[in-house]
Image (tube, rainbow, N blue to C red):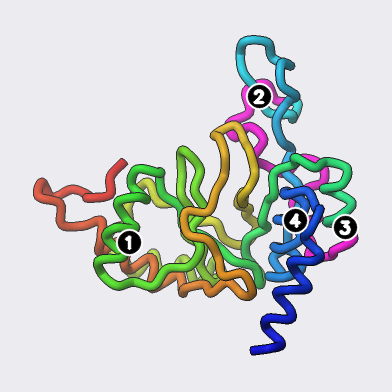
Amino acid sequence: MREILGRRRRLRLRRKGRPAQLDAALTCATAWQWPVLPGVGLQAAGARGDRGRGCACPDPECAVPGAHPFDPGLLAATTDERMVRWWWTNRPTAPILLATGGRAPCALSLPAVAAARALVELDGMHVRLGPVVATPTRWSLLVAPYSLERLGELLHAQDWVPSSLRFHGEGGYLVLPSSEVGAGQVRWERAPAPDAPWLPDVGAVLDALVEASSGAPDGGSRLAY
């Protein structure tokens, strides 16, 4: 117990005076060992006149403004403290991207409206969930790492899967709090434990989501967007 309290005190002292975004990135990379990298981010305020802030990448029609890798690329994701400090010291407002898969968390995501309903359903089913990342448009349920082969087997075993469900696994990425992207502010709907976030198995969460989404009175999905 003393060791845990001492670790937390040292962590608080290290955080004191650090910019919030750098602090969040360092927590992910060093405390949780989640590989991260900076997202491309948004254009400076006023850069697009009355059209609002767009993506800082060269694509004027970018589908996910600010919320994707650009320079560096996804393969640069790391848990190295020095690299993370350098990135966010030079780009203090850059979004935090988690490189999913491998030994890092993966995720299942749903549109925000459907996800809010899903959490109520899953709580009623006494399903234990891990951290949940929320944007104004989509919520992501973090799960333990899984391989593409495992995911394929799980999906094959299901008779039906909600069409709005997306999977963020090996080779993918996810925007983490407290980033700001084109969709809006990214936040924790359910925050991770400070020391070692617990992650549920993807199979258990997928089974629960499929069960929760079936059985609507009209024969459709209760979690349809």
Q: Which residue is mark 4?
A: 23
Q: Earlier in the sequence, mark 1 or mark 4?
A: 4
Residue mark closest to the camera, 3 vs 1: 3
Q: Which residue is mark 3?
A: 83
**Which quarter of the picture shows residue 105?**
bottom right
Residue mark closest to the camera, 2 vs 4: 4
Q: Which residue is mark 2?
A: 54
Q: Nearer the viewer, residue 155 or 174?
A: 174
Q: Earlier in the sequence, mark 2 or mark 3?
A: 2
Farthest residue, direction top: 50
* Amino acid type, callout 3: Met
For label 2, the SS is loop
Question: Which numbered tag is attached to residue 110?
Answer: none
- Spatial CA distance of label 2 from label 1 is 34 Å
Magenta region, residue range: 59-82
Q: Which residue is mark 1?
A: 209
Q: Earlier in the sequence, mark 4 or mark 3?
A: 4
In the displayed structure, would residue 160 be above or below residue 145?
above
* Amino acid type, callout 4: Asp
- Crowdedness near tag 4: few (<14), some (14–19) or many (≥20) residues, C-alpha within 10 Å: some
Query: How far across and how far down the image is residue 189, in percent?
Result: 47, 54
Helix, strand or loop: magenta stretch? loop
- Spatial CA distance of label 1 from label 4 is 33 Å
Q: From where the camera sits, is residue 153 visible?
A: no
